Structures are given as C-alpha cells and as structure tokens.
Image (spheres, helix red, strand yellow):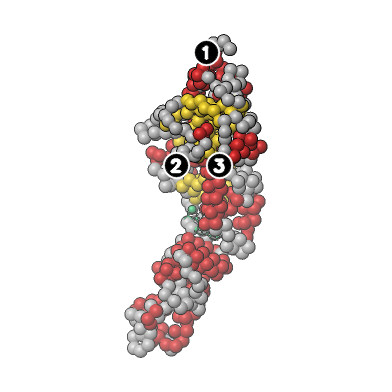
Amino acid sequence: MKMDINAFFRQATIRICSTLDIQTAMERSFQFIKDFLPVNRMSLDLLDPDRNVLHMVASVPSMKAFGQIIALPEEGRDDRAFHWASNEKIRIDNLTDPEPSTLRLLKRLGLSSQVSLIFMRLEIEGNRIGQLVLAANGVDRFTEEHARLLQLLNEPFAIAMSNALKHQEVLKLQDMLADDNRYLQRQLQEISGAEIIGADFGLKSIMDMVRQVAPIDSPVLLLGETGVGKEVLANAIHQLSQRREGPMITVNCGAIPDTLLDSELFGHEKGAFTGAVSQKRGRFERAHTGTIFLDEIGELPLQAQVRLLRVLQNREIERVGGTQAIPVDIRIISATHKNLEEMITGGQFREDLWFRLNVFPIMIPPLRQRKEDIPALVHHFIERKAREIKIKERPRLVPGVIDRLIAYNWPGNIRELENMVERALIQHRGGDLLIDSPSPSSRTPGSPAESTSNAGPMWSLDEVTGDHIQKALKLAKGKINGPAGAAELLKIHPNTLRKKMDRLAIAYGKKR
Ligand SMILES: Nc1ncnc2c1ncn2[C@@H]1O[C@H](COP(=O)(O)OP(=O)(O)OP(=O)(O)O)[C@@H](O)[C@H]1O
Ligand SMILES: [Mg+2]
C-alpha cells in the first residue's frame, strides 16, 4: 500500500494522544493502524522493573472480559514470544509450536495457534517503560517495512503510555488524599471530643442555639473566656451542618505572623514574593464547600480585617500575586475571648467586619457559672487522659476532691481542669487519685475576704473555709497537732480539722 509517511505519522499520533484514557487511545489507534499493518490483537505492556515482569495495561480487542490483567515474566521463560533477548528496539517473531500453557493463553487472547508477532520496546529518556505488541494470525505476516512503519510511532506510544500512567497515579493519589482527609477529619472529631460534656446540663441552652444555627449558613461568633470550649463548639456546629462532609479549616488569627497572614489566608501564585517557590492555596480556598473557623479573631491586624471583610462581601478571594478572583463557598465561624465592642471603640476592630461576623453570637458561660458540669468533666477527662497515657485501671478519687474542685473558681475554665486532671494522673502512684487544685488564696479575682465586701462573685462557704485552713497550715508550717499547730490556730480539735481537710481534699502529713 502506497502512502504518505508524514500523513501516517500525523494521523496515528493524533489518535494515540487523543485521550488520557489509555484503553481508548489504544482502540482509536488500532482502528487506524489496522489499515496499514496486519493485526488481530494489539496490546500495551508495562514493565514493573522491581519484579521484572510485564503487565498488560491495555489491549485491543479489550481484555475486560477476562477480568484481570495478565502479567508476563520478562526473563527466564521458555516461550520465545515473550522473551525479550537483546537491546533491539523492535523485533519480529513467529510462534509456531507453542507449549500448552502458551497455547491456552493465545486462545484466551482470541489468536490462533500460529501467530506472527512484532514487539516494540517503549522508552522514556532512555528508560524502558514497557512494550507494544502486535499479533496477527498466521506465520511471517510482518515485514521489515511494517517494522519501520511501527517504529515511527514509538515515541507517541511511549509518551502516551507514560502520560496515562502519570495521570492514573495522580488520580490514585487524589483518591488517597481524599481518603486520608476523611480519616483525619474523623480522628480530629474524636480528639476534639465529639462528646460535649454538659450538653444536657450547664451547656443546655448553648447547645440549643448550636443546633438551631448549625444547619443554616449564617456566620456564628463564639464568645467566651479562654478555655471554655469555643473550638469544641465550632467543631460541633460544623459537624451538625450540611457541610460536615466538607473540610473544617481552622485559622488561629493570632498565631500567624503579619507578614505571612495574607499568603496563609488567601494563598499565593508562584513567584509572588521571594520564597514563593510554588503556587499555594490559602486556607479560604481549602475551606471551599466547608467551614472556616477564624479563631482569636480579635488578634487580626486591621489591614487583614479589611481584606477579610472583602471576602465576606464578595465571596471570592484573590491569591497574593494573582489576578483572578476565585469564588469560595464557605461558612464562617469566628471566636474570641476579647471584647470586640471595646476594641471597636478603641479603633482596633472594624465595626463593619463585626456586623458581618456577629450575625449569630453565642456567649459560652465560664465554668464557674456551670459548676454542675464539673463532676462529669472530671470523669470524662480521667477516662480520656488515662486512655491517652495508657493507664489501664481508672483510679477512684480521694473523697472530697470533687467538692474542692467545685469550690475553686476556674479562671482557666475547662482547659485548666483538663490540665489538672492530666497532671494528677501523670503524678499518680497508686491508691486514690488526688486532683490538686491551686490553693484558694492564689485565686482570682481577689480573696474571699474581699469578695464578701465588694460586688464581685460570691465565694462559697467551702471555698472560704478551705482558704482559711490553707492559711493556717502555712503559718503552722504544715503541722496540725500540738502547740502552734494549725488546729490550735483555728481553735478546733485536730481530728475535726483532719475531717474537714479530708472533705475539702486538702492534703496533710506525708500527702502534702
Ligand atoms: N463541653 C466540653 N466537653 C468536653 N471537653 C471540653 C468541653 N469544652 C471544652 N473542652 C475541652 O477543653 C479544652 C479547651 O477547649 P477549647 O480549646 O474549645 O477552648 P477555647 O474556648 O477555644 O479556648 P481558648 O480561648 O484558650 O482557645 C479542650 O481540650 C476541649 O476538648
Ligand atoms: Mg480556642
């Protein structure tokens, strides 16, 4: 058949490179090639260099019916047809007297017992990646002219194969990442304690608000002192929303240096500034279809507040050094322990931004205003921390500990309680567990004496008693009995004092 070599090359290449799906590319090129070369079957084999075997990755007619890819050993097999002996680029061979196993294979492949074969080695930058095999029923069907023609297509086939494999790899990685992400999100949920203690007690009204606002997309502003559980509630809102399958991205606005803030939040294009070696997606982009949690929003510098406001208004971001606006679909939850209204008056926080964020404010009460949750929290943290530090048995508490913890006023809120339990468990050496809250005299604000005289929070009788006993113990240098002992100072019987100390979980003697 007389033909124009250039046209052949062009037409074949267009078909080979027409798609990233290697099977489709093979089918298209087969349809074209079969008018120029005798061919009943064409297959593409990938070399696995570690195991030195060839895997059939695509084949025409399709191998799908066979269910799985056939692996052919590269070396050491008797079958001449599959044995690649030399460094030659292309090889013509005949298979006339196949072994029973090869015969079975030929049959499965829809070929007759005598076949002509042409093998073409595929390389990328000198590295062998696989081979293309053409098979035609009957002997001596391929000529040197056929080999030359096929050799023209060596590069296109090699490139197409390599691109298809890379593409597959990317898809695989993408799947793996998505899977990792789901797994991490689940873990995060477990770590951050999907369990909200006090949801039916001290936090009941708060949880009602959370359930109310979670399904709608409105911004939520979480307010409350440090350690009250703002992040826990932000997670709960995300989990209870329709965006729960999407990402939950947290930004600690106070923790990112000013100079990096823009690039962290909005991303940057390659070369946008020194050090921007590659393109980077910002947190807003990553939060697309999910929730972004802007923690410590009160720490956001004024300039960044302006840009944040723009994102909230336009629902799109621009990467640093970029020219294109990227639309983002996000739900915004922000949190702060600061008084934003005061900051607005002081000119440190933009009022227009505050209006945008403050659509649905939730004020989380400090722990001292929901002390009924303390026993459950203590047990929750003992359970969790014991699991974390791998303590098998859960120690019982020294009698009176809970009362004493309830007497304390918890400036650091739940985090402080959590740390205290953890410390106690780490220091625990058998017996009942003593959770040692700071002596009441180190409490803020003020001391019991002051609190009774001014309008500050009222101290309980136990708090005052505990505080007073501690003072006496200090004066008596820990001594309870005898002259200048704490009992004498307090004008009570030493045994009565010990009982009171037990109840208030104040350690004495060796335990101190
Ligand atoms: N209701 C709760 N049930 C169980 N654990 C809680 C609860 N609230 C808070 N915690 C735990 O207390 C710790 C502090 O909570 P979180 O980080 O949410 O507080 P925060 O208000 O964000 O504090 P900060 O202002 O310091 O950032 C966390 O370890 C969290 O798991
Ligand atoms: Mg926090």
Residue 285 lies, in percent from the top left, at: 52, 37
CA distance separating discs 2 and 1: 38 Å
* SS at circle 2: loop
- Residue identifier under label 3: 175
Amino acid type at mark 2: Asp
Regarding residue 123, the answer to whether it shows in the image is yes
Q: Quadrant of residue 490?
A: bottom left
Amino acid type at mark 1: Ile
* SS at circle 3: helix
- Residue lying at 62% horizontally and 56% vertically, measured from the top left: 207
Q: Is residue 94 above or below residue 76?
A: above
- Residue lying at 52% horizontally and 36% vertically, measured from the top left: 79
Residue 296 lies, in percent from the top left, at: 47, 48
Of callouts 3 and 1, which one flags the residue occurring earlier in the amino acid sequence? 1
Q: Is residue 221 above or below residue 122?
A: below
CA distance separating discs 3 and 1: 42 Å
Mark 1: few, some, or many residues within 10 Å (few <14, many ≥20)?
few
Foreground tag (3 vs 1):
1
- Residue lying at 38% horizontally and 77% vertically, measured from the top left: 512
Amino acid type at mark 3: Asp
Residue situated in front as seen by the camera: 236 or 304: 236
Q: Say whether mark 1 is within 8 Å of ligand 2.
A: no
- Residue identifier under label 2: 50
Q: Where, quadrant-wise, is the N terminus in this rendering?
A: top right
Q: Quadrant of residue 202?
A: bottom right
Determine which of the numbered discs, if any, sits on residue 5 in the image: 1
